[in-house]
Image (tube, helix red, strand yellow):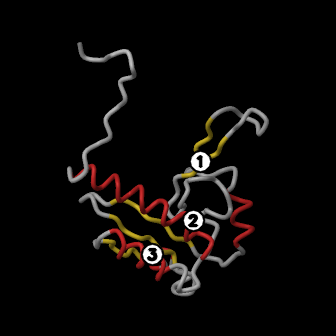
Amino acid sequence: MVACSESLVWELTKRSSSFIKNKNGRTKRSGAVSFSNEPGNVKSLNLFKYSGLANSKAADISCTDDNRASLFVKTASKAHTQPKKGKATIPMNKDFRRVEAAIKKHTQDNYYRKDLNEALLGKWTKVYQANRRAKGTKKPVPTKKGRGNLPK
């Protein structure tokens, strides 16, 4: 693989990638939003800041099949010519606060994409809540019925 700059990769992939999903219209004026479901994209937005393809350093949290979570980290220095070996997946099996500390340790304390720290912690919160609902330890929130249906 030929090494090229991050900005060049972004210019080539920002409009034509198989991961892009466009919603709500066609122009900026009509409120179009462009999502991306590429690996390493924390907020699933088609922006350079969150892109897992264009950035040499990327991080993401995802659910696993057994209702757990894993932290995906794209390494920049190791194996830059071998993309398959340039990724690390770290299982997150502890309780909420320990995983939160582990995420901070792998990103903020390690000088690795400090700008993604809040987005990663927000996504970890949602993944944790979804896994608890899937395991049955937390009951789903009941829907509100309104005022008109009072028992008689």
SS label for mark 2 = loop
Mark before the other along the chain sequence, 3 or 1: 1
Q: Mark 1 points at which residue?
A: 35
The spot of residue 85 in percent (x, y) is 45, 79
Q: In front: 92, or 76?
A: 92
Q: What element carries label 3?
A: helix
Marker disc for residue 52: 2
In the current view of this chain or complex, which residue is farthest to the right? 29
Which of the two marks, 3 or 2, is nearer to us in this view?
3
Q: In this view, does 103 lie to the left or right of 96?
A: right
On the image, the x and y values in percent for residue 77 come to 57, 87
Tell me how far mark 1 sits from mark 2, CA to CA: 13 Å
Amino acid at the residue labelled 3: Ile
Residue found 66% across the figure and 64% down from its top: 49
**Residue 62 relative to residue 39: left or right:** left
Question: In the current view of this chain or complex, which residue is farthest to the left?
Answer: 136
Q: Quadrant of the N terminus?
A: bottom right
Which mark sits nearer the N-terminus, 3 or 2? 2
Please, what is the three-letter code of the amino acid marked with disc 1?
Phe
Report the side of 91 relative to 59 (left or right): left
Rounded to the nearest angstrom, the CA distance separating label 3 from label 2 is 17 Å
- Residue drawn 27% across the image and 55% down it: 132
